[in-house]
Image (cartoon, rainbow, N blue to C red):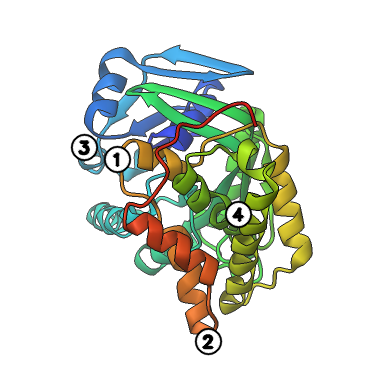
Amino acid sequence: MRMAVIGAGGVGGYYGARWLAAGNPVTFVARGGHLEQLREQGLRVEHPEFHYRHRVDATDLAALCAGDPAEFDLLVLAVKSAATRDVAATLHDWFQRYGRRVPVLSMQNGVDNEGELAAVLGQDAVIGGLALRVGTHVEAPGRITATGAGQVVTGPWPNREEAVAGPATDILPTFVQTANAAGTPVIETSDIRRELWRKLVINNGLNPISALTGWDSRRLTRNPEMVVTIRRLMHEAAAAARADRVTLDGADVDEMFQLIHDLDPIKTSMLVDREHGRPMELDAICGAVMARLRQLGEDAPATELLAGLLRNGIWSTEPDRDDA
C-alpha cells in the first residue's frame, strides 16, 4: 500500500516506520531540521519491540504536491490540529490540478479535524482515526522514541450510518489489513466520532494539567489530589460531547482514566510542546470542550482555569521526578 505521512513527527514517524518496515512504500512529509535529518541521515525509531534505522523517502508538502497524487493510495495526516485547514486547502488544490482525490486518514488530536477535512475535500474522501495506547516523541531531528501497543482506531467519517461511499470507504479495508500486518493493531469502529470524543476525554483530562505541572502520566494518575482535578476535566469533556450528539457517561470516564492510569509513564504532547517552546494544542483540546459547553449553555470551570493559566504562561518549572 503506497502511503504518504504528512507530519512525520512522533506519531507519523512511528507509524510510518512500522508500515515501511513491513514492505509498504511510505513518503515522509516534514519540514525544518527534522526534514533535513531525514533526508541526510534517515529515520531512527526506538520502541521496546521495534527498532528502525534506515534512509527514507522524505520531502516537504510543496514538493509532495508537485507530483501526481495517483502515486499514493492513502494520505495519513498527523500534523498539529492548527495546521489542518491549511493542509486541507493545499491538498484540495493538488487534487483539483490532477482531477484525482486520494483518501485522507486523520490521526490527530481533537474532534474537529475530520470535519474540517470533509468540508474541503469531501466527506467521502475522509477516514477518521486516532492513535491509542502509544507515547511518541521526537527526541532529536530524525530520532523518535515510542512506547506502548501503538493501536490505531479508525472508521468512516462521521460514523458508518452517515458515511458516504467513495475513496475512503473503498480503501479502508486495505488499510486495516496493511496496518494489522505491520504490527500496528487496528480497532475498527462503526462510530469514529464517538471514539474521538473518548480520546478527547483523555486528552482534556491529562494534557493541560501535565503541561502545567511538568509531571508525566504516572505521577499524575497516582496522586490523589491531582486525580480529583483530572476526573473533573474528563467529566467536562464527556459533557461537551453532547453538542456533537455523542453520549458519554461516567463509565466512559472511568474506562478512559483506567487506560491512562495503567499505561507506562509518558509525557503528554502538550507538555512536550511546552518544553520545546512550540504552540500547544489548547484550541484543539481545551478549546473544543469550552466551545461545545458554551453551545450547550454550560460552563467548563476546570478546563477554563487550566487553559487560562497555560495561555498566560503560568506553569511549574520544577523538573519531573520518577519517585512518585
Give how far apart the Cα atoms at labels 3 and 2 are.
46 Å
Say which residue label 4 marks: 199
Residue 73 percent coordinates (x, y): 45, 42
Q: Nearer the viewer, mark 1 or mark 3?
A: 1
Taking the spot 55% from the left edge, 53% from the top edge, the residue there is 203
Q: Nearer the viewer, mark 4 or mark 1?
A: 1
Disc ID at residue 157: none
Say which residue label 2 marks: 297
Mark 1 vs 2, N-terminal side: 1
Residue 315 percent coordinates (x, y): 40, 48
Say which residue label 3 marks: 63
Disc ID at residue 277: 1
Task: In the rendered view, tell whether residue 177 sits above or below residue 280.
Answer: above
For the residue marked with disc 2, what is the amino acid?
Gly
Q: Nearer the viewer, mark 4 or mark 3?
A: 4
Mark 1 vs 3, N-terminal side: 3
Report the side of 286 relative to 181 (left or right): left
Mark 3 vs 2, N-terminal side: 3
